Amino acid sequence: MDTRQHDDSRTSVRVEPASRLLAGAAVTAVRAPSIWNTQPWHWRIAHDTAELRADRDRQLRSIDPDGRLLTISCGAALHHACVALRAAGAAVAVERLPDGDDPDLLAVLRYGGTLDWSPMAQRLRRAITVRRSDRRPFADEPVPEHRIDRLRDAARRAGADLHVVRPQELTTLSVAAGHAAAAERTDPVYRAELAAWTGARLEGGEGVPLDTVAPVGARPVPVRDFTGDDPGPSIYSGIDVADRNARYGVIVIDADEPAGWLVAGEALSAVLLTATDEGLATSAMSDLVEDNAARAMLRRMLGSVGQPAIGVRVGVPGHGAAPPQAPRRPAKDTVEVVVDPRA
Ligand SMILES: Cc1cc2nc3c(=O)[nH]c(=O)nc-3n(C[C@H](O)[C@H](O)[C@H](O)COP(=O)(O)O)c2cc1C
């Protein structure tokens, strides 16, 4: 059997129709959000199946020693691929963590025939191409409640809960984010990894370009400082601060373990794409769960029911041009198609 890389133009290899569909979906999934844009996944497609594997070489030592954020990122890629397949009219069966002896094999997708046209799948597929993290302060307009309801439904359909943070819980979120920032700012391993993933790594189509980040500034809940030189985010609750119409959600899972993290990533993707489809801007916030003390604060906020997996920030986009899209690795580096020479 001849193994060849899938190329970006999707035209140079002769593969079976099911493999072609799966490869197209895997290429689309490169647009999924990932921790620091590490894109820590690898797809292997053979006949009518696609295997999604974790790429541990891309795991961040400082903030992700257990692989929680890596697995959430892969879950987001899994959901993106499923959206692309649904939009292409393809049915797939998904087996999550199918092999207890092979924990890096996160999912196997098996092509299962055709499905009817779905307008919703088309809309979410379009959202994949336009979504990006928007860390700027949001506009001074509230997010209509029915839009928040749609996000909650999207998370639930993906198998997790979206806890929508109530006004009286904002202080907990602020303190948790501030605590995580303070702890991480003084960690030399964190600082070295942050410098790499906002610097040299960008050449390979990965990492977080500084023109996609926004000043931390005075916000009710500080966002991550990607520059590493902010003196320390301040927490303000006055009426003159930016971002006061931001809404926050926490993706909640049953158990803090790989199966839950994968589902959390799928739910994160579902929430972000649905919000994009609703014309809302979003950014993920994992600092809230990276630090043990911050995670414990969130757990208490949830009434000790379920495990906080990741935070989401949602709002009406601010004025001016949207931030640029972050780059991606070439698909040939993440998508491998196994070609049967007899085909
Ligand atoms: C698990 C996970 C954790 C993330 N944590 C943060 C975060 O704490 N702060 C932030 O601004 N963005 C965060 N992001 C967003 C990524 O930085 C972003 O998806 C990546 O840089 C690619 O950019 P894009 O979302 O614009 O496509 C996170 C994304 C994922 C999937």
Image (spheres, helix red, strand yellow):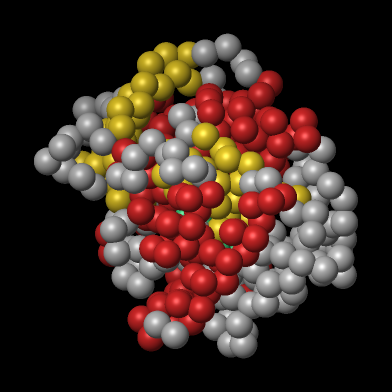
Q: Which residue corresponds to the image point at 16% horizontal and 43% vertical from the top-left?
A: 102
| Image location of residue 317, percent across then percent down | 80, 54
| Image location of residue 180, percent across then percent down | 49, 70
**Is 70 placed left or right of 146 in the picture?**
left
State whether residue 211 appears in this view. no
State whether residue 306 appears in this view. yes
Q: Which residue corresponds to the image point at 15% horizontal and 37% vertical from the top-left?
A: 100
Please state, as top left, top right, bottom left or bottom right, where the N terminus lies in the image: top left
Between 243 and 48, the one nearer to me in the picture: 243
Please state, as top left, top right, bottom left or bottom right, where the C terminus lies in the image: top left
| Residue ranking furthest to the left | 101
Q: Is residue 158 above or below residue 102?
A: above
Q: Is residue 275 above or below residue 246?
A: above
Residue 326 image-quadrant placement? bottom right
Between 294 and 99, the one nearer to me in the picture: 294
Q: Which residue corresponds to the image point at 57% horizontal and 55% vertical from the top-left?
A: 284
| Image location of residue 236, percent across then percent down | 74, 71
Between 319 and 162, the one nearer to me in the picture: 162
**Is 333 placed left or right of 167 in the picture?**
left
Q: Which residue corresponds to the image point at 68% horizontal and 72% vertical from the top-left?
A: 235
